[in-house]
Image (spheres, coloured by chain):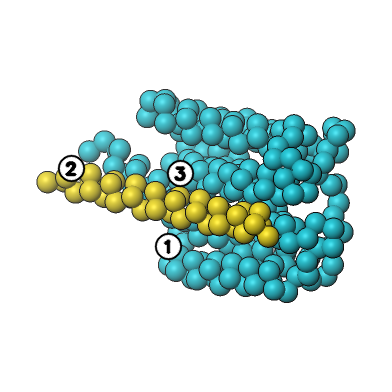
Chain colours: A cyan, B yellow
Amino acid sequence: MTSMPGWWSKARPAVWGLALVLIAASLWAAFFRAPIEAQMGIVQKIVYIHVPSAIATLVAFALTFGASIAYLATRSRTWDEIAASSCEVGMVFATIVLVSGPLWARSAWNTWWTWEPRLTTFLILWILYGGYHVVRASVSAGSRRTISAVLGIVLFVNLPIVWKSVEWWRGSLHPRAVTMTGEMRQALMLSMAAWLVFFLAVFQERLRLERLRDEAEAPR
Amino acid sequence: MTYAVAAYVLAALIWIGYLVSLRARAARLRQRETVTRR
């Protein structure tokens, strides 16, 4: 793969439009359609941004993993651009998870932060993927793509650890399963769809930037 | 209520900041490209 297909660029406005419509609909569903949770009250509304952002983080880092393997197999710069772009957008989603989580925890658990398994493993994930960008910016252009790809593969080990942390370690405050009413579940599903489409829209923008950078750094 | 609103406002600010940074970085690269071509 030497470049993205033509439909990819043409779809940009449509993807942005769909993302904004879905986000507006998901906010309406979260705040006006889904009922207020009986025990936690209105602070539970954070779930509609916290959980979709966490899922988008995992999707972004999984894409980095897949594209890193594809880069090492093909040595096509497009796969490297996809891996780096997806990783950066994933970092923004992960930051939102780490910002919205403590706001919820303060109300639900009466603390901003606690070293329970899911929080700890997610923080480690955020720091390590932050390291991916530090390393990528530090190494020479000649070895940057290969080192980034190796990191993109190795760091993926963290994802199942975060996912399974509530089962593997005791003392987790995150619930293994959540009971929701039908309207709450619908609002959560809509929010997930909205933020995943938004991920795609931002990822397209970040990919364009990476392509511009590659072209600017290419020898003339 | 305050925490819920704060979470959404902070998320919006993070995304706005990130998207502005994307535009700024793209503009800087385009400018550098133009200068190099001259």
Q: For residue B36, which numbered disc appears in the image?
A: 2
Q: Chain of mark 3?
A: A
Name the residue type under label 3.
Answer: Glu
Q: Disc 2 residue type?
A: Thr
Is residue A175 visible in the rendered image? The answer is yes
Distance from disc 3 to disc 2, alpha carbons, whole Å, reads 23 Å
Q: Note whether residue A199 is visible.
A: no
Residue A52, quarter of the rendered image: bottom right
Which secondary structure, mark 3? Answer: helix
Q: Residues within 10 Å of mark 1 (few under 14, many from 20)?
A: few
Q: Label 1 is found on which chain of the structure? A: A
- Mark 1–mark 3 Cα distance, whole angstroms, equals 15 Å
Circle 2: element type: helix
The location of residue A161, given as percent across then percent down, is 75, 35
Which amino acid type is marked by label 1?
Ser
Q: CA distance from mark 2 to mark 1?
A: 26 Å
The kind of secondary structure element at disc 1 is helix
Left of B19 or right of it: where is B10? right
Where does label 1 land, which residue?
A: A9
Provide the residue designation for mark 3.
A81
Q: Residue at x 45, y 44 (%)?
A: A81
Residue A6's x, y, as percent? 42, 63
